[in-house]
Amino acid sequence: QLFRSKLSDSVVMFLLSAVVTIGVGLVTIGIVLLICIPFAIIGFIAYNASGWIPVIVVAGFNNPESVARDLAGDHYFVSNLGVKLDPSGKDGDGYISKLGKDGKILVKRFLPLVGKLNAPKGMAVIGHTLYVTDIDRIVGFDLKTRRTVFETSLAATKTKFLNDLAVVDSHTLLVSATDLGKLYKVALKHKDTFTQYAVLPGANGLYKDGSKWQAVSFGTGMKLNGGAGVITGSKAAHY
C-alpha cells in the first residue's frame, strides 16, 4: 500500500507538472501572437497601400553595369559597357539607358546625345546632372537637355578602371579606382582637380551611411578575399 501511495503521488506530481508546463507554453504562445499579429496586420495594410511591385526582369541591355535613380524617383538609368565586354577598352560603344518607374526601357541609348562613352560604370545624381565614370574620367550630363555639362580626367593617376561614384556634397564626388586600390575626392567646380581620400585594395562600391562611408572591395590577386567595411581616416577598417 505504501508503494501504491508513493506511485500515486508521483503520478499526481507528474500530471500537475505537465499541466503547468502546458499552461506556461500556451500563455507564451498567446503573448507572442498578441505581439506579432498587430505587426502582421500593419505590414499587410502597408503592402497593399504602397502597391509594391514584384521583381521583374528587364532585357535588352549590353553588359549593364550600374543603376541610378533621379532625385524625383521617376526614372532609372542603367550604364552599359557596350556590346563588347571590355571594361577598360576605349571603344566608344558604351551608353546609358533611361527606364520608367515600371522598369520599362524608355530610351535605350539615352546618353550620350553627342560624343561617346567607352565603358560607363558607376553613376551619381546631383540636382539634374547625372555623373558617370568612364575608365579614367568622369562625365556629367544634364538630364533635361542630355548635353554634356562636365568632364574631368583622372588619367594622371594611371587608372584604367574608375568604378563607383558617390555624392559627398553638392560640389564633390567620391570615386573608386579599382585597379589602383584607391578612393579619390573629385571637385566639381574645378576641372581635373582631385585628391586621394583613402587606400582600399580592389576598391569598388561606395555608400554613405549617415556620417560614415561604407565600401566594398574585390580584394587582390584575383582571389576570393574581398569584403565590406567602413572607411575611417585614410584606409579601410572593419573588413
Image (tube, rainbow, N blue to C red):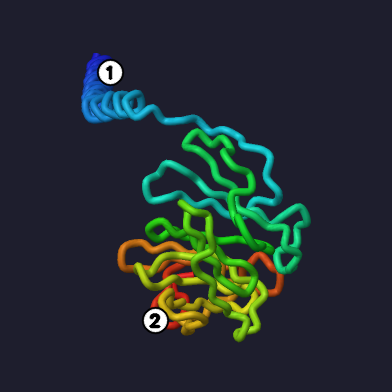
Q: Which mark is residue 11?
A: 1
Considering the numbered disc 1 on the image, is that residue within a helix, a strand or a loop? helix
Residue 228 seen in the current view: no
The residue nearer to you, when weighing 4 against 191, is: 191
**Spot occupied by residue 11 in the image (x, y as percentages of width and height):** 27, 18
Is 98 situated above or below 232? above
Residue at the (47%, 37%) spot, across then down:
101
The residue nearer to you, when weighing 128 against 44, is: 128
Q: Which mark is residue 233?
A: 2
**Spot occupied by residue 35 in the image (x, y as percentages of width and height):** 23, 30
Residue at the (65%, 75%) spot, across then down:
179
Name the amino acid, label 1: Val
Name the amino acid, label 2: Gly
- Around disc 2, counting alpha carbons within 10 Å, would you say few (fewer than 14), some (14 to 19), or many (20 or more)? few
**Spot occupied by residue 103 in the image (x, y as percentages of width and height):** 54, 36
Left or right: 159, with 186 as reference point: right
**Spot occupied by residue 214 in the image (x, y as percentages of width and height):** 43, 65
